[in-house]
Amino acid sequence: MNARVLPYVLILPVTLFLCLFFLYPFLLVSKQAFSTGSGFTLDNFREVTSYWKFPTTLRNTFLLAAAVVPVQLALALLMATMVNKMQKGRDLILYVWTIPLGISDLAAGIIWLAIFEQSGFLNSMMNGLGIVDKPVNLLTFQNPGLVFLAIALAEIWRATAIMLVILVAGIGLIPKEYYEAAEVFGASPWKRFTRITLPLLRPSLQTALVLRVILAFEIFAVVAALGGTLFPVLMGETYAYQFDLLNSGAAAAMALIILAISIGFTLIILRLLRVPKGATI
Amino acid sequence: MAEIQIKNVAKTFGAYQALHDINLTIQDQEFMVLLGASGCGKTTLLRIVAGLETATTGEVWIGGRRIDHLPPKDRGIAMVFQNYAVFPHLTVFENIGFGLRMQKLPNDEVKRRVERTAELMHIEQLLKRYSGELSGGQRQRVAVARALAMEPDVILMDEPLSNLDALLRMEMRAELKGVLAESNTTAIYVTHDQVEAMSMADRISVMHQGKIVQAASPIEVYRNPAAEFVAGFIGNPPMNFLPATPSGNGKWTVGGQDMNGPVSSETLKFAIRPEDLRPSETGLKATAKVVEPLGAHLLVTCDVEGALFRAVLDSDMTVKPGDVLTLAPQTDRVRWFNPETTLAVA
Ligand SMILES: Nc1ncnc2c1ncn2[C@@H]1O[C@H](COP(=O)(O)OP(=O)(O)OP(=O)(O)O)[C@@H](O)[C@H]1O
Ligand SMILES: [Mg+2]
């Protein structure tokens, strides 16, 4: 077959698949979001954004992302650097650290609920140590900070590994010689990290952050399990519009808002961690 | 003063002994070349001096100060790496200034020194570029400039020219030597290229299987190789060897001919460089096998009583394969080796 045509023929099945199951539904959702039955309108967007809960859900989602992602980034970098320095047992440690990746987000939420709920580990432990007289319900509207903390912890536990895996691969690609050169020219271990590792890791950091930030805006099951309605987030509201209020137009509008936020942040991350032309390894 | 003393340095990797009891003193401002075949331990020795590797035993002193327990940055050294290790995410300017920035020198001092070394290495017009936008030769210049900008006492170079093409290598060789001579630094230069070693070195240390076999000036290493290995390694083509049997009183039989040599009753090896042979009436009978005209010379590979023997002759001679030549060795250039110890016999 003609070598110029062949690549296109080979990617055709995937393209068709994506068009059928991604692009087409996406267009349907968009159509739904921009119509109420009588032509093009922004009514759905007006409705969801003027709802009193919308600012809260937006703020909660952003707060959570802002609290979780930096911690995950720092942890993933630390863990990746440690793994990279290991000689023996490296693979074993990596497997153990990535176990949470294999657990669904709802299951992760439930695991952490088992820790925090009234009859959970934390209560029995505090009880046993005599810190509290009887088990207390921690995850209530009186303890919004604790609810937030529980959700953040569960998210950090659950989704740091995805960044870790990407960063471990990225760090492994940096030639050892750069570190030796930096060492000879007087860079301390910290300086080698900030002056060599971080800048050379930019492509991997981009990927890891984009993936992680998008997932952070889509947070749903962990929040549902631990916070219920105490901590409304964007995705939870979308679910409520679709399945509780049966307002699919509003749900579609919410989905597009989340998409827009994700795209916006992706562009910001790509821009901030841009590698200048000619400056790649 | 930056005299380097390497005292009884040995290095083992697991069960493998890469360096055996190395002793070497490099004078202040001397240009020392470590020469040897691949895997003989040159890089390992250099890295021990740099502090990137720790010696299993032994000491390293620079300028009268024991430095083998110090981190690389406190040893007063700078290094040029084999693959340059020019940082890809920094411009040429920041690459050259990297070590100066780490020393927290003020901006204008960094600028002054970067610009001066860049000028010295003829890369002042490249300062804004990234290493991905440079040729191999330019990258190599950046690597040298980065080391020189540190104004180190000692500069360590690990095969810095090995990735360049032959012409560029010749050009850089001369340039590098000039620049280093002016900078008054002591240099250790690793290479497996004997031409590079001969042309650049004040002294050459020939290494073989983790040992230093001979450390001497290039001409000494060439004329008076201390061991058979050196004689066979240096020179292109290498020295010829023929078995010699003693016939008493300093008389020897070599290739069926009588020769004068050292007084000894053991069998020795007779050695002569291919270019120290002249066609003559009397001498070794050599049957030509392969004749290679090399332009300036004629390289003739012959057979002397079953032993391989090469001669470099005048290019205006006509020699055909099968011709029997009579080659007289220049007597003051003949060397003798003990086949047991492989060392030269005086
Ligand atoms: N980190 C290491 N672990 C185990 N063995 C090593 C290590 N580094 C070097 N060696 C071994 O030590 C010996 C000397 O290596 P070295 O790199 O010093 O050789 P070299 O003379 O620089 O060779 P080349 O000219 O190929 O660079 C080699 O046999 C090598 O396999
Ligand atoms: Mg080497």
Image: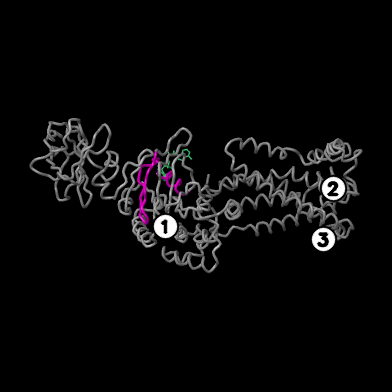
In terms of depth relative to the viewer, which is nearer, A245 or A172? Answer: A172
Q: Is residue B126 above or below residue A122?
A: below
Q: Quadrant for ligand 2?
A: top left
Q: Is residue B25 magenta?
A: yes
Circle 3: element type: loop
Compute the Cα span from label 3 to label 2: 44 Å
Tag 1: amino acid:
Gly
Q: Is residue B115 above or below residue A156?
A: below
Q: Which numbered disc, 3 or 2, marks the residue closer to the eye?
A: 2
Residue A125 occupies quadrant: top right
User: Circle 1 sits on which residue?
Assistant: B137
Residue B178 occupies quadrant: bottom left
User: Circle 3 sits on which residue?
Assistant: A40
User: Circle 2 sits on which residue?
Assistant: A146
* B93 displayed left or right of A131: left
Q: Do the dots labelled 2 and 1 sit on one chain?
A: no
Compute the Cα span from label 3 to label 1: 63 Å
Q: Earlier in the sequence, mark 3 or mark 2?
A: 3
Q: Residue at x 75, y 56 (%)?
A: A261
Residue stretch in magenta: B21-50
Q: Do the dots labelled 3 and 1 sit on one chain?
A: no
